[in-house]
Image (cartoon, grey):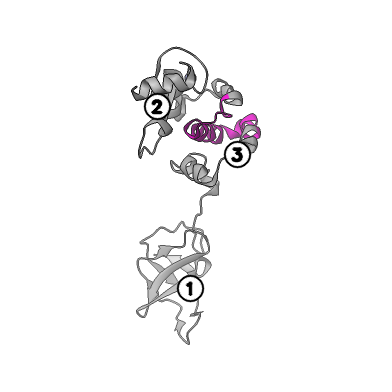
Amino acid sequence: MGLLEDLQDRSGKVCEFCGTADTLSIYEVPPVSTGGFDGSVLSCSTCIGQIENPDTTDANHWRCLNDSMWSEHDAVKVVAWRMLSRLKSEGWPQDLLDMLYLEPETLEWAKATGEGVLEADKIVHRDANGAILENGDSVVLIKDLKVKGSSMVAKQGTAVRRISLDHENAEYIEGRVDGQQIVIITKYVKKV
Ligand SMILES: [Zn+2]
């Protein structure tokens, strides 16, 4: 049997999200690595269209996840998680999300497209004036800084080029001063 037949068999020839029997095709859940049976969902064009075009998402359509998020297939659960995350400001999707348990590696898969990561939850590094810092920026120290673990003092006014951001902590960046890679606290720098 081919993949389509296998998925029809698994789903009973209905959309694995909303249950409609029309316009079904294979949706390969991104990021597609192996695709195939475990990485694909049989889905209708309405569901696929809304998954792929966030602007067209109709929250009410996704009330179908009330039932389908309990699927035993990870590919279905991963998309359910992404759509509920996208819609969580509506309220009810957040309630469903709270009930939806994904194994750790399945959750990693669900998060792989960045869906559900709110701007506000992203780590943003800002300098002393509130300007956003990016990897590769240059900054100037606005006070003398003792370098942890050494006797070195990085002087106020020192330029640090091509900083890198600490992706787990918005208060830290790294950069090279006097040939030494040091950690610097963002509130003591100014972007140049
Ligand atoms: Zn559907």
- Vertical position of residue 122 compared to residue 167: above or below: above
Label 2 or label 1, whichever comes before in sequence order: 2
Q: Which residue is mark 3?
A: 101
- Vertical position of residue 192 compared to residue 40: above or below: below
Q: Determine whether the beta carbon of the residue marked 1 sits less than 8 angstroms from the nearest atom of ligand 1.
A: no
Please state which amino acid type lies under the numbered disc 2: Tyr
Q: Quick check: is 74 in the magenta stretch?
A: yes
Please state which amino acid type lies under the numbered disc 1: Ile
Nearer-the-camera pick, 44 or 144: 44
Label 2 or label 3, whichever comes before in sequence order: 2
For label 2, the SS is strand
Q: What x and y, as percent, mark residue 19? A: 52, 17
x 40%, y 70%: residue? 175
Q: What x and y, as percent, mark residue 122? A: 51, 50
Which image quarter holds the C terminus? bottom left
**Name of the residue lying farthest toward the top:** 22
Magenta region: which residues? 68-95
* Residue 27: image tag: 2
Which image quarter holds the N terminus? top left
Please state which amino acid type lies under the numbered disc 3: Tyr
Place residue 37 in its image quadrant: top left
Q: Which residue is mark 1?
A: 142
